[in-house]
Image: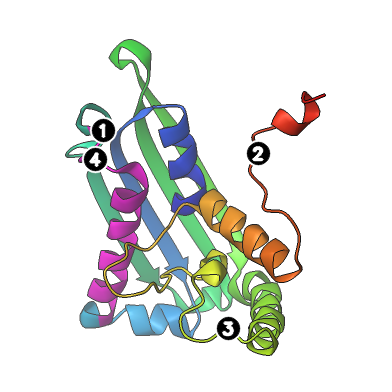
Amino acid sequence: MKTIIAPGLKARMLGLAGWYSTNILGNRDGEVLDDPASFKTKEESKLSVLHTILQPEKYPTLYKDFAHVVRINYYPPRGDNKEGWDNIDIVGWMGYPMQIKVNFLCRDSILAAPLVLDLALFSDFAQRAGMKGIQEWLSFYYKSPMTAPGLQPEHDLFIQQTKLKNTLRHLMGEEQITHLGLEYYQS
């Protein structure tokens, strides 16, 4: 949810006062994350996503010092079902406070299956095209994208999708998507 909603907040320049998220997991993920050390790693990765998307150093009046709480609760009866609750306190024009509430009920395996299939097909395609090493263009499919040393991972889902589409277009010898729209008005 963070990689979908945060880019929208930033695009509309809506401030963020706080983001509270909790997940209820009953499968092996929930059991593993019930361990404090395992949870700490997950918490740090979730916390870093908002900072890389919102860029508080660039937009301090909108995103500096927002509260961010992440909780993961293991509840065995949930099984493969996952429930995520998010409370997002945003700030609009003239400092007006507002809230976004999200209750996301899903199945982890149903969400993951098509991603795994796409990754297998695109990885095979990349290998056939002679690509080696980190495949940043596939970051669209990962919670924690890998990059070359020294580069910041891109967490904005929409930028990730554009990279994916442009890489596929490049591999097929097609023009890159620029979204300029100028070609419609040139005579």
- Given residues 66 and 32, the one toward you in this image is 66
- Residue 37: image quadrant is bottom left
Measuring 71% from the left and 62% from the top, which residue is drawn there?
169
Query: Was residue 26 drawn as part of the magenta stretch in this picture?
Result: no
The residue pinned by badge 4 equals: 56
The residue pinned by badge 3 equals: 131
Vertical comparison of 94 with 1: above or below: above
The residue pinned by badge 1 equals: 59
| Mark 3 and mark 1: Cα distance apart in space | 36 Å
In the picture provided, is 112 more to the left or to the right than 72?
Answer: right
Measuring 24% from the left and 40% from the top, which residue is drawn there?
56
Assign a secondary structure to mark 3. loop
In the picture provided, is 62 more to the left or to the right than 167?
Answer: left
The residue pinned by badge 2 equals: 179
Q: Verify CB contact (< 8 Å) between mark 3 and mark 1.
A: no
Assign a secondary structure to mark 2. loop
